[in-house]
Structure formats: C-alpha cells, structure tokens
Image (spheres, coloured by chain):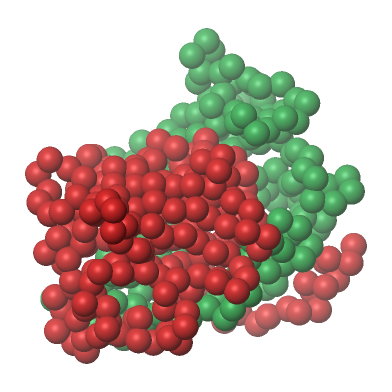
Amino acid sequence: MTEQKNSESQEEVVPQSLSVTTYQTVGPYFKIGLEALYRDDLTKPNIPGQVIEVAGTVFDADLAPVPDAVLELWQADCFGRYMDQPQKKPFEDSFGFGRVPTNEAGQFRFRTIKPGALQAETPARQAPHILVSIFMRGLLYRLITRIYFSDEAGNADDPVLNSIEPRRRDSLLAKADPAQPYRYEWNVFLQGENETVFFDL
Amino acid sequence: MPPNFCPSYVSSVKRSPRQPLVHLPQTISELTGPIFTPPANLQPVDMTKGAHGEALGERILVSGRVLDEDGRAVAGTLVEIWQANAAGRYLHARDQHDAPLDPNFLGCASLVTDAKGRFAFETIRPGEYPWRNHYNAWRPAHIHFSVFGPAFATRLITQMYFPGDPLLPFDPIFNSVRSKTARERLIALFDWDTTVPEYGLGYRFDIVLRGRDETPMENKP
C-alpha cells in the first residue's frame, strides 16, 4: 500500500506529553450530528444592537459552489463583549454562536447583531469581526477565517487585518450592499486567485 | 498545522487552500467560546433504543474524558456524535450505499461532559462502508466526534476508530495524519472495566484538546 509507506516515511516525532487529538474530516454526512444546533439566526429578543444579514457562497478551486460545507460563527455582542458564561441549556439564552450549512447552490445566509469593536486596550483595539470555522468533506482540518465589515473605519487600525498582505485583506471584508442597508455579502474562495485568507491559531 | 492538501484523499484536491495559513495570535475572540454547565452526574446517553425497539447490531459502551494538554479535565463541554448503523449506512439522503437503514437507529447524540470531563454513551458498533475515493475503497468503522472545548481555539472535530480494524492501513483519511502517535490516539482502546457481562463490550476514547496560548495578544479584561 503506497499511501501507507508514504506516511511512514514522513513520520514526525511527537513529544511524549499528552499529545493533542488530531482533526479528521467531518465527511459527507455531518448533518446527522450537527443539524440539531444549526443556527442561522443569532438574534435574540433581549440582545440589543443593529440586526444585519450576511450572505455568500463557498467556492472550490474550479469556482464551483460547495453544497456540503458548514460554517460556524463566534462573535461579540454590540458592545464588543463575548458571552462566554456557562450555559445551562446549550444556546437557548446566550448570544454569539451560529452554525450555518451551505445549500445546494453553495450559498449560506445568516442574521445576527453587528458585533461591536473589542474594547481590550492592548496592543490595539480590534475592529468588529466574526470568527468563522469552516468544515466540509475534503477538509482534513477546519479552516479558520474572520469576517470584517467593509463600512467600518476601524478596519484601518485592526492588528489582524494589518498583519495580512494588503492585496489579500479584501477577502475578509463583507461588502455592505448600497441598495439594501444592513445586508452584507461575503464569499469564501477555497483556492485560486482570490483565495480567502485562512488562519493558523 | 499540517496542510489540508492530501492527494490520496481525492476530494481535498479542489477544496484545500494553497496559500500558507496566516498566523493568528490568540486574542479574546479566540480565547472565548460557548461553554456549558456540567451535569451533576455522569448520565450515559443511549443511542440503541429506537422508536419501535432495539437497534440492530453489536451493542457497545463508549466512554472517555475530554482533557487539555496538561491533563486537566475539560468540564462542561459539548460533545456531538454521529455514525453509520451496523450495516454501514448513514441516515442521510446522500448516502446511497446498498445496505439497510435501521428504523430504530438514528446514529446521533449530543452530551455535555461532567465536572471530571467524562462522557459515556451506549451505541451500536458502526459498520464499514464503501466510498468512491479509489478502487475498492472502504472506510474503517468509525464514530464522528465534535467537541467544543473551552474556546474557539480548542474546537475539534475528529473520528474514533476501533482497535484491530484491518481497513486502517488502507484508509487515506486515517493515514493523512503523519504521526504514528497521533494516528494511534484516534483508535479507541478495548476496556474491560466498562465491558458489561452478558451485555456489551466497552471502549475507551480520551480526547485531548490543544491548550490555549499562554501568551495571547490581548489579555482578558
């Protein structure tokens, strides 16, 4: 079996402390396990802030839409605070987590409250953003990226955006739709000329 | 993090990024995440009882702990599980494998780890099934695990395999993990202690989540 020989020859040394459990792909059938927590509307009656909608498409190397991806979202509230207190009933009372599958046309859409800028002092204030994990068949590991908003002046001083080469920063900006206030478009390009910036934590 | 591009796993070719990943220092955004109140007692989840009776196949009892890299329990974290039935068929519209569905087996569960990071569930040993990655390709028996951990940074989705599975050496997904130690961590251990006489075999599967960076870019306020 050539594949196995190959992997043996590239053996890596792992320290003998508790080694971290590695990722494996979600495969094609993740809906069975993940569907119960699909959340495409993060808004809650008791959570203040501007309601926005973000929509887009996930594209593969051939610019074909990916109909079997799932995006997970994590974000602060409109004051830039994360609601990370222990929840008694998963996701019933808290704000900030979303999970959105793509449809047959590779499209996703979610409704949320626009996050505020993060108030932490050092080393720099972060512009409003949403964290995104992307899972799909064909990905051995999750992809990590961020959604920023094209109409935020604070983007210019955001330390994460500024750590990316300028021509690629655009891939993280959800574009405000001039015709429809509070609607944004943000697409994911897995490969190619416009490949989205993905992060390593 | 190793790259997603893995030619022996064919669907990775057009779905894996080619640009190097950009290093993201952990900020408060990555150091937070949804966390939950641990249940007072460890209550095993039973996936074997269907609407009309018992699911078909070999009953097994899977248990383990979710730990961080320093061996500390990860309490109150959400674990989601999904799997094929005993015949190797998923309850999913896209699964067209010619094997029977079991009306008494949904193949999914979710639970929250207790104060000691423990979880336990009873299920049916999943069957192997064919896929079209290469000629005569079969996936080894496996159970999918999704674990949140205490922060966005610790999120993990993985698969648990079974000891002695003859398909493991041939599986490009399992073998995409280059470290032998890391591959072996994905294989559950047969466990006498949780094996129940006249009832079912026990398997142990401990999950170790990465720690959060100790030098985050921003401190928690």
Task: Measuring from the top left, give residue A35's x and y in whole percent.
Answer: 44, 37
Residue B182 showing in the rendered view: no
A180 lies left or right of A193: left
Task: Measuring from the top left, give residue B76's x and y in whole percent.
Answer: 30, 51
Residue at point 49%, 47% (across, down): A107
A107 lies left or right of A153: right
- Viewer-nearest residue: B152 or B149: B152
- Viewer-nearest residue: A100 or B87: A100
Residue B199 showing in the rendered view: yes
Name which quarter of the figure residue A195 lies in. bottom right
Q: How many marks?
A: 0
Residue at point 68%, 48% (across, down): B162
Residue at point 21%, 62% (across, down): A115
- Viewer-nearest residue: B204 or B129: B129
Q: Residue furthest front?
A: A179
Q: Residue furthest top?
A: B52
Q: Quadrant of the C terminus of chain A?
A: bottom left
Chain (red): A
B212 lies left or right of A138: left
Residue at point 73%, 78% (across, down): A11
Task: Measuring from the top left, give residue B51's x and y in whole percent.
Answer: 49, 14
- Viewer-nearest residue: B149 or A142: A142
Looking at the image, is B200 positioned above or below residue B52?
below
Q: Quadrant of the N terminus of chain A?
A: bottom right
Looking at the image, is B178 positioned above or below residue B185?
below
Task: Measuring from the top left, give residue B147's x and y in whole percent.
Answer: 43, 53
Name which quarter of the figure residue A96 lies in. bottom left
Name which quarter of the figure residue A193 lies in. bottom right
**Color of chain B here?**
green
Looking at the image, is A101 positioned above or below residue A151?
above
